[in-house]
Amino acid sequence: KRGFDLFCTVETYEQLRFTLGSHVVDFGRSDPELPCCVPPREAVDFWIIGGCGGTSGGALDPAIKLIHDVAQQRNIQHPRVNVLLIGAEISLGDRTRSVTTKQQQVVRATAAGLVCKLAGDMANSQPIDETRPDGTSFSVSSSDRVWSLLLADQTNGQADCSTVDGLIRVVVEALFPRLFTMAGIHLGDRFKDFVELGSTGRGQL
C-alpha cells in the first residue's frame, strides 16, 4: 500500500510518464551500433526488475500500467513488458539485514500475491480498464499486460547468493546475453510454444 500510494500521486505519475515517454521517443532514432530488428512503432521490449518488499511490491502493478499508458500514447503496437521478480527469500536471508517475523510474513505474502496476479492475468484474454491517478482511464488486454514473468531468488540449485546486491549482479550478467545476443532470439522462440499450445490468453498463432 505504501509503494502504491507513493507511485500513484498525480504529480509523480505525470512526471514518470513524461520521462518514460521521452526515452521511448529516443528509441525511434536509428542507432548504427545497435540496429533494431523491428521498427519501434511495431514492438518494444520493456523490462521491470522489482522486488516483493513494502514499496517495490506495491509499485509493480502501477509501473506495468504506466508502460502501457506510454505505449498507447506513442502508438506502439506491441509493448512487451517483461517482469523479473527478485524473490522473497533472498531479501529475508540477506546476511546484511535483520528482518522481523512480521516483515517475513508481509514479504512472503506480497511475493505470492504478485506471482498469482501476474500469472492469472496472462491466462485471461479479457480487456481491463486501467485508471490513472487523475481519474482518466484506458483499456488493455489482461493477457498482454505482461509478456513474460521470471523469478530470481537466492539459489538456482547450483550456486547461492548471500545478499540482494550479489543476486542483482548475477541477474545483470544473465540478462545481458538474453538482451544482446542470439540467446535471446532462441529463448523468444521457446515462448512461442506456450502461445501455440493456447496456454496464455493471447490465443493461438
Image (cartoon, helix red, strand yellow):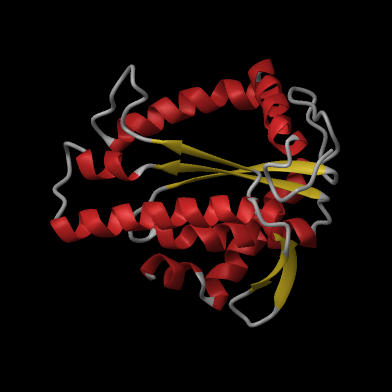
Q: Please name the residue shown 70% across and 76% down the image.
A: 137
Left or right, residue 94 beside residue 182: left
* Left or right, 99 with reference to 117: left
Q: Which of 96 and 146 is in front in this view?
A: 146
Residue 35, horizontal then vertical, whole percent: 79, 26
Quadrant that contains the N terminus? bottom left
Residue at figure coordinates x 24%, y 57% from the top left = 105
Q: Is residue 172 above or below residue 114?
A: above
Query: Percent position (x, y) of residue 133?
Result: 58, 77
- Vertical relation: 103 (above or below) 88: below
- Front residue (pair 105, 73): 105
Residue 44: image location, x then y, percent: 74, 42
Residue shown at the point (51%, 72%) measured from the top left: 8
Q: Nearer the viewer, residue 48 or 152?
A: 152
- Residue 17 falls in which quadrant of the image? bottom right
Quarter of the figure that contains the C terminus: top right
Picture quadrant where residue 56 is located: bottom left
Q: Is residue 115 depicted above or below 16 in this figure? A: above
Question: Which is nearer the eye, 21 or 65?
Answer: 65
- Locate residue 34: give its quadrant: top right
